Amino acid sequence: MDIHTENGRVNYLKRFFSMREFGVLIALIILCVLLAIASPYFLKVTNLFNVLRQLSLITILAVGQCLIIILGRLDLSIGTVMCLMGVIAAQLSLLGMPAIVILVVVLLCGMGMGAVNGVLVTKFGVNAFIVTLGTQYIARSLALLITGGMPTKFSNGLNMLGSGYVGPVPISVIVMAGVIAVGAVITKKTLIGRNIFIVGSNEKAAKLSGIRSSRLVFFSFVFMGFLCGIAGIILAGTLKSADPTSGLGYELEAIAAVIIGGTSLTGGRGTILGVVIGAALMGVLKNGFVLLGITAYWQTFVLGAVIIAAVLIDSLKNRNDA
Amino acid sequence: MTHEDLIVNENIVLRMESVHKKFPGVKALDEIDFDLREGEIHALVGENGAGKSTLMNILSGVYPYDSGKMILYEKEVSFRDAHEALENGISMIHQELALAPLVSVAENIFIGRLEKSKFGFVNLKRVSAECKALLEKFDIYDIDPNEEVGRLSVSQMQLIEIVKAISRNNKILIMDEPTAALSQVETNKLLERICRMRDEGYSIVYISHRLDEIMKVADRVTVLRDGKLIKTEQINNITVHEIVSLMVGRLFEETFSRESVSTEEAVLEAREIGSCKIHDVTFELKRGEVLGVTGLVGSGRSELLETLFGKYPIEHGDLRVRGEKVKITSPNDAITVGIGLVPEGRKIQGLYLIRTVKENISSVRLQKSNFFVNETGEKESVLDMIARLNVKTPSIDQEVNYLSGGNQQKTIIARWLLNNPDILLLDEPTHGVDVGAKQEIYQIIDTLAREGVSIILVSSELPEILMVCDRVIVMHDYTINCILPKEDLTQEIIMQHASNLEGGASSLS
């Protein structure tokens, strides 16, 4: 496992190849090349931005999920909370509130939902899987209660976040890029990020180093809620309508993107770069099925296979290390 | 004591002939010839990474070997897995206890081969009775077969591990550091049992860092170094000194000695402090002093340190640091007043195994930084610390997982030194660390004391306590039994106080 040699350049090259994200990146590149050959439409700018727009929601959610998974937890509520946030945004728009108020209220609501998860997990020590399964049901119920089960029109200017463009670039893609940047800075440059990895790899030892692990877990859930708020507005904005039954399965797709990107489900390991590559692989795969006109029923089959393959490669690698 | 006369039978039960094993990137076993006779204790020694674990994993079927021969009862064998080795008469007793804590003693012993009735049900009453008989065969009367294993003491668990291994009627046992978690009294008891088993015809491969134990019980000793077999010798024909020299590959300064640099200034004063774990603890720690803490397993040694460090909040009593009254209710409080803890069980409580050496060392110091981490400053201070403590690692970006035990321990010590502690609490810092690294750790302790750091050292190894410490606290029943000055102190005196003058009657408490 020694990746360091006297020669600095070999060192970096070797390091690059031994990165956990490397295999997935190669898979992504190969897939893109194959698609570019198979379909002349794939490399068109409009299509590429379309792909990015479609994967923006998953990526935004996956960045937050990544932090939570590195901490050794899991958040199953995010798809539904995102939906609930879209519903709240649409309801506020019906009341004629200005965009900035809607934005602030929705983000605060998202953070509030995250805080509920965070408190239950840290203060009461309930397993995060169970807590967020519970809040998932509760959030769904709230969305249905608020709307009476019917989709609500989202007519505020804020819907630009989901449907607007700057030149050829969808605004949702710009937002996604911002979230990725924030995630990358948090994990790479800040004390919070350092502590997240440390707590994720050994919580007992972290406590004995004077790190307050529960604060970090709480923070990560609140940050996740914040991202759900952003994603909710984008989701409702895309269709200019909030459907209280939407958002199902997004939490699992976000987890899939995180895992494909090489983040360890047991915590302590993972990168935002990996998340981006994982989400991109999933997005390109979906686009390929559309372009090649293959039935969507095969899409989930292949996605499942990719997830298993990614984890399999990882565990084989680990076995060799041992 | 000699065992020469006890070996009536020189039948070889297990033999390895030029066994070879290669790992990608890891030291191999190189042409190993090893044999085990009927009714003998064959000790296996070597520094960490010398190949002991590889050899024993091959013997017990965990790894296959690349080339060579393994002959068991005159038959050439090659195990596919540990199960096959078990079936062929080789039982392994692991260092990490592999018991299921929430399950009864009886079920643990018979795990994997519980007899089932016609309908597939297990008759737990019968299992429990069988277990009782088995325990009594080994003179164990104080363990209830129906007790949950998680409620037993570590030493009792170790006994259960051994009983479990023997219960299969396997005559070949491989023991990996069976006394690592035991106190002196418990160790002696266990060693007696092991000797008795040898006399009953069991063949035992005995792996230990504790050479004094090996001198006491082994018939032969094999020294490994860098994957090679250096020497196999009758124990009567070799001294501890010679063994150590063979292990490290050079002549070795056997003992360590240091002079007290303790001052009169009290850095830490505890007056009748208590937590949920310990009670009525009163002592003083001077600047530059190395204060030893020892006692039997379950006497509250680790708990004393953990209380001082705030893992168990101090509920009553008076604690002063540098003369000022302090309230310590969390590790953070302790760190703030300049206390550091190198905890027991470095892999469980100390290391971030899958993170880098750099992250492991900087983790405490970093908490003082602002929102953003100053990476250049961090790198410099970590490199500086690595040089100071002689941590051997290919780079600071190496996962700490891949370091040897001694270097891992130094990594944790470095973590605290970076924070400039006034008081350093060390809990079994030389556990599972090879001889060379041990000496280095003693040296670090001495240097720190000279620099004015006060140290509390918990250790179950009395020679270590006697070599390194200025005064010794002996714990009993979660409080201080007595504090002994270094002058004229012997292991016997400490043991008497540790067992509270009852002559070791409470060894399994």
Image: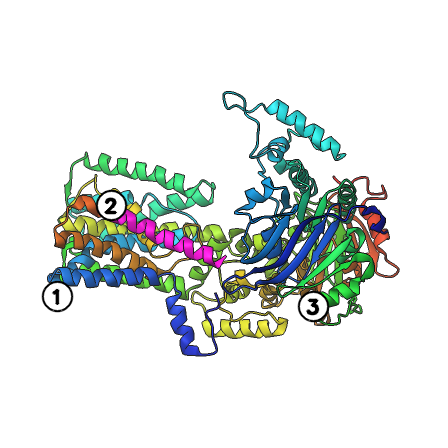
- For this rendering, which residue is in front, A15 or B204? B204
Kindly identify the amino acid type of the residue bearing the numbered disc 3: Val
Under circle 3, the secondary element is: helix
Image location (x, y in percent) of residue B398: 50, 66
Image location (x, y in percent) of residue B185: 79, 46
Q: Which residue is mark 1?
A: A167
Its colouring scheme is: rainbow
Is residue B49 in view from this perspective?
no
Image location (x, y in percent) of residue B17: 63, 57
Q: Which mark is residue A256?
A: none
Q: Which residue is mark 3?
A: B248
Under circle 2, the secondary element is: helix
Q: Chain of mark 3?
A: B
Left or right: residue A240 versus residue B271 is left
Q: The magenta stretch spans which residues?
A: A300-322
> What's the distance in space between the residues labelled 1 and 3, CA to CA?
70 Å
